[in-house]
Image (cartoon, rainbow, N blue to C red):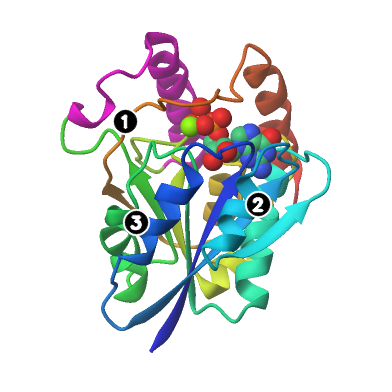
Amino acid sequence: MKRLAVFVPAKDEEATIGQLLDRLACVRVHGCKLFAIVVDDGSTDRTAQLAGGRGALVVRHLENGGLGAAVRTGLRTAVESGADLVAYLDADLEYSPEDIPRLVEPVLAGRVDYVLGSRFLGGSRGVRGMRLYRRVGNLFFTLLLVLLTRRWMTDGQTGMRAFSREAASRAEIVHDYNYAQVLTLDLLRKGFPFEEVPVRYAPREHGRSFVSWRYPLKVLPAIWRELREP
Ligand SMILES: Nc1nc2c(ncn2[C@@H]2O[C@H](COP(=O)(O)OP(=O)(O)O)[C@@H](O)[C@H]2O)c(=O)[nH]1
Ligand SMILES: [Mg+2]
């Protein structure tokens, strides 16, 4: 049996974290024992209590560190917990835990070390309801990644990904605010093969997105820093 760690970065997601973990507990992946890790990033609501009550391993940042810092903690915790492979998804139910078997299949089969769950593969049905500025921003950053990596991909900003143990151990995230682009740049520059698989998507119904006008101002310099790393 392989150990599959699924971590969830969460900041003030009490409206959805319980349902997400309940659904995750019903997910079966052939040949794997799945365990859940919640990285609570300084939530001021009941996110951590609800997650702990459902038996997830809860790692808490006492202060809000940002999504990049939370994913870094999630990857490290998964590796330290002895995971053979790692997946994560957002806490706000924009992604479906039921897509995890399909997400991890390319890693389990030994084809690749890194998987992006794409909301845009197989037609755009999955992104109904996504705001126009988000679609445009997503296209911009995805095309930037395509140019920088010279590899085709359709969703550079996805909040649902999977990793081999080795990719999870070697991944480095150069900034705390976010991880989306710099993590892919880091792993592809280290030579890890990757694949995209289609995943379902529905915009959040509770809480608020951290994405604001500041996003490009934070993300573009971080991409620059990542590219300058040896
Ligand atoms: N750790 C951490 N997670 C966050 C933060 N802001 C948002 N998240 C979580 O990261 C995931 C994605 O955040 P979200 O704001 O929905 O981003 P979006 O889906 O790109 O709009 C969700 O699970 C959030 O709970 C933060 O400051 N720190
Ligand atoms: Mg979201």
Kindly identify the amino acid type of the residue bearing the numbered disc 3: Arg
Residue 148, image x, y percentages = 52, 36
Residue 38 spot, x, y in % from top left: 59, 56
Indicate yes or no whether the magenta region holds residue 127. yes
User: Where is the N terminus found, in terms of image quarters?
Assistant: bottom left
Within 8 Å of ligand 1, the CB of disc 3? Answer: no
Residue 178 visible (yes or no): no
Determine whether 29 is above or below 7 in the image: below
Say what secondary structure mark 2 lies in. Answer: helix
43 and 88: which is toward the camera: 43
Find numbered disc 3 in the image and state the secondary structure of the residue it sits on: helix
Label disc, if present, on residue 48 of the rendered structure: 2
Segment tinted magenta in the rendering: 124-150
Checking the image for residue 202, the label placed there is 1
Q: Is residue 26 left or right of residue 20?
A: left
- Which amino acid lies under the numbered mark 1 shown in the image of this protein? Ala
The Cα atoms of the two marked residues, 3 and 2, are separated by: 17 Å
Q: Position of residue 116 (x, y in %)?
A: 39, 49
Disc 2 or 1, which lies upstream in sequence?
2
Determine which residue is flagged by label 3. Answer: 23
Mark-to-mark CA distance, 2 and 1: 24 Å
Residue sitting at the far right: 63
